[in-house]
Amino acid sequence: MPVHTIAFMLLRFYALYWFLDGLNRLVGAVWQLSQHGSAPGYFLNLVSLGIAPVFYVIAGIIIWFAAPRISRLLMRKHDSNVSLSGVTREDLYAAGFVIVGACYFLSSFAPFINWIHYFVIEGAEEGMRKSAESGEVYDFYYCITTLLTSLTLILIGPRWARKLAAQNKVGNGVGDDS
């Protein structure tokens, strides 16, 4: 397998990570701002909270589609074949999805447990009211969406890997082995 193909896959997983992280943050920002929609400066707050997540989403999309060119550009002088006997492109994709999912899971599990502990100590209703008043409930929802995203990548990633590997076999020129 050419090194540019491996670089291509890594770039795609990086793009996926940025896209999903930006999407999670954007959903949280919109939810947080919808709670204070009638407050003065709503539009300014929407813009300031939405800039970074929108950047991540757009950058993820750009990197996803530019990955074939970037990988070939990066590996043009070092594009030798790597022997991965028995490892298919589908295996690499599936491993990548699981790795990105595990990264998300590990980054969100401890804060999620912390929030659960907080709600147990404060009581679910009282804890939610206090965190909503202080605006910290956004952090709780970010933990939940990140945790759900991670589980989705881990559980459904191998199926997506099969589809991506099949798509590349059709010969669309993206990450091909030629």
Image: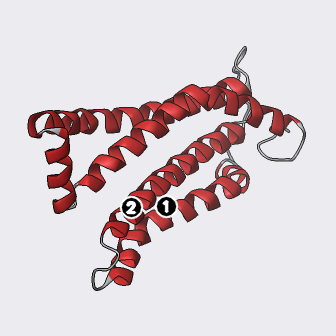
Quarter of the picture containing the C terminus is: top right
Q: What residue type is labelled 1?
A: Tyr
Give residue 19's quadrant in the image.
bottom right
Check the image and report above or below for 44 versus 155: below
- Circle 1 residues within 10 Å: few <14, some 14–19, many ≥20: many
Label 1 sits on a secondary structure element that is helix
Q: Which label sits on residue 56?
A: 1
Tell me the residue at 70%/56% (across/down). Answer: 65
Q: Which residue is drawn at 72% across and 35% down?
A: 80
Mark 2 packing: few (<14 Cα in 10 Å), some, or many (20+)? some
User: Tag on residue 114?
Assistant: none
Q: Residue at x 64, y 26 (%)?
A: 158
Provide the residue designation for mark 2: 31
Q: What element carries label 2?
A: helix
Please give left or right for residue 60 compared with residue 84 in the image. left
Residue 102: x %, y % from top left: 44, 30
Question: Mark 2 belongs to which amino acid?
Answer: Trp
Distance from the alpha carbon under mark 2 to that under mark 1: 18 Å
Look at the picture and state if 154 lies above or below 3: above
Judging depth in this view, the residue of 101 and 75 nearest the camera is 101
- Of tags 2 and 1, which is closer to the observer? 2
